Amino acid sequence: MPSNQPIIESHGLGKRYGPVRAVDGLDLRVDRGEVYGFLGPNGAGKTTTLRMLAGLVRPTTGWALVAGHPPGSPQSLARTGWLIETPNFYPYLSGQDNLRVLARSCGLDPRRIGPALDAVELTPRARDRYRTYSLGMKQRLAVAATLLKEPELFVLDEPTNGLDPQGMADMRELIRRLAVGGRTVLLASHLLGEVEQICTRVGVIQRGRLIAEGTVEELRGGVAKLWIRAQPEHRAREVLERVLGADAVTQLDGRFLLRAGGERAAAINRELVLAGVAVSEIRAAERSLEDVFLELTGGEGGL
C-alpha cells in the first residue's frame, strides 16, 4: 500500500436498521502513522462504524477500504488488529495458552507470543489462568492477541472502559507504544481527556455524520477569549462593555470572560487602568476538548 494512501478511507458509508440511520454518509480518512480519536455521544454511530470497517456489519450505502482492501477481506484482516467491545478468552487457560490457541487457529508464528506479552507487560502473569486476570490485564491480553499479526493498524473501541485510574494510565501508555514505527491507531473513546492526551487528530460523529475533524489544537482554536479579574467589578464591567460590547462580556465567579483575542489584552488592560480599575489577572482562556465537544453536539446524549 503506497505510503500516501490513507490506511482507512470511506465514502458515503451508511447503515440503516429499518427506519433508523445508525451511520449516514460517513466520509472518513485515517492517515498512516497517526493516532486518530473517534468521538461521539452515545448512539452516534461509533461502534457501528467500526463494525463495518472490520467487516462484521455490511453497509447499506457507500464503501470503505481498510489497509487498501475491502473491510473483512483476508488481505485487510491480515494487516489490522481489532479490539471491539469486550474481549473473550478461555477462562481456564493461561494468558499464554490462550495466545497459543489463537496463533494456531490463525496460522500465526507462535514465536510472536513472547514479544507480544512483553509489549503489554504481561510476561510475569503469562502462565496464570485468564479468569484470575483483572479487567486491565484482560484488555492488555486482547491487545497482545492483536500484536500476534504484527499489524499496521490497531482499532480500539473504548479500551479503558471500566478500568481504574492506574489501569487507564497503563492503557494510555500502551497506546502510545503501539503508535511507534509508523503504525496507526484508531481510538474510539468516551473519555475526552484521554483523547486530548494521546491523539494526533480527532473526528467527531453525531447522528451518524462526521461533524468536525482536525487536530486537537485546530478544534480547540475556535473563538479567542480572555479571562480578566479586576476590582471594583461594577466599574470593570462598565469599561469592558463599553470597549467590547455587552455581548462579548460574561461575568463568572468574580471574573470576566471576554470574547477577545490575546492581541487586545494590552489595550483592554490600559482602558481599565485609566478608569481606575485594578487588574489582578489577565490571561488567555484555553478551550478544552470537552468544551469543543459540547459546543459541537449541544451536549446531546452524553458520552
Image (cartoon, rainbow, N blue to C red):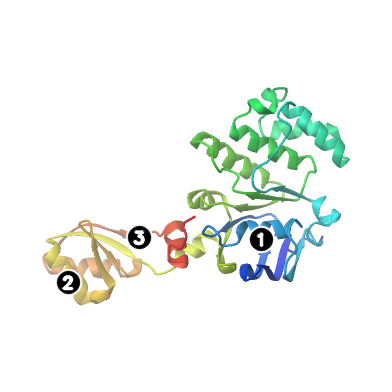
Q: Amino acid at mark 1?
A: Thr
Observer-nearest residue: 179 or 54? Answer: 54
Splitting the image into 4 quarters, where does residue 203 fall?
bottom right
Q: Is residue 200 left or right of residue 1?
A: left
Separation of residues labelled 1 and 2 (CA atoms): 51 Å
- Location of residue 151 in the rendering, given as x and y in whole percent from the top left corner: 77, 47
Residue at image coords 67%, 34%: 120
Residue at image coords 70%, 29%: 91
Name the residue beneath numbered marker 3. Answer: 285
Q: Amino acid at mark 3?
A: Ala
Q: Earlier in the sequence, mark 3 or mark 1?
A: 1
Splitting the image into 4 quarters, where does residue 115 fall?
top right
Name the secondary structure under disc 2.
helix
Q: Amino acid at mark 2?
A: Val
Residue 49 - label = 1
Name the residue beneath numbered marker 2. Answer: 239
- Location of residue 273 in the rendering, given as x and y in whole percent from the top left corner: 16, 65
Separation of residues labelled 3 and 1 (CA atoms): 35 Å
Residue at image coords 84%, 33%: 110
The answer to the question of whether label 3 and label 1 lie on touching residues, with beta carbons closer than 8 A, is: no
Name the secondary structure under disc 1.
helix
Splitting the image into 4 quarters, where does residue 146 fall?
top right
Q: Is residue 100 left or right of residue 237?
A: right
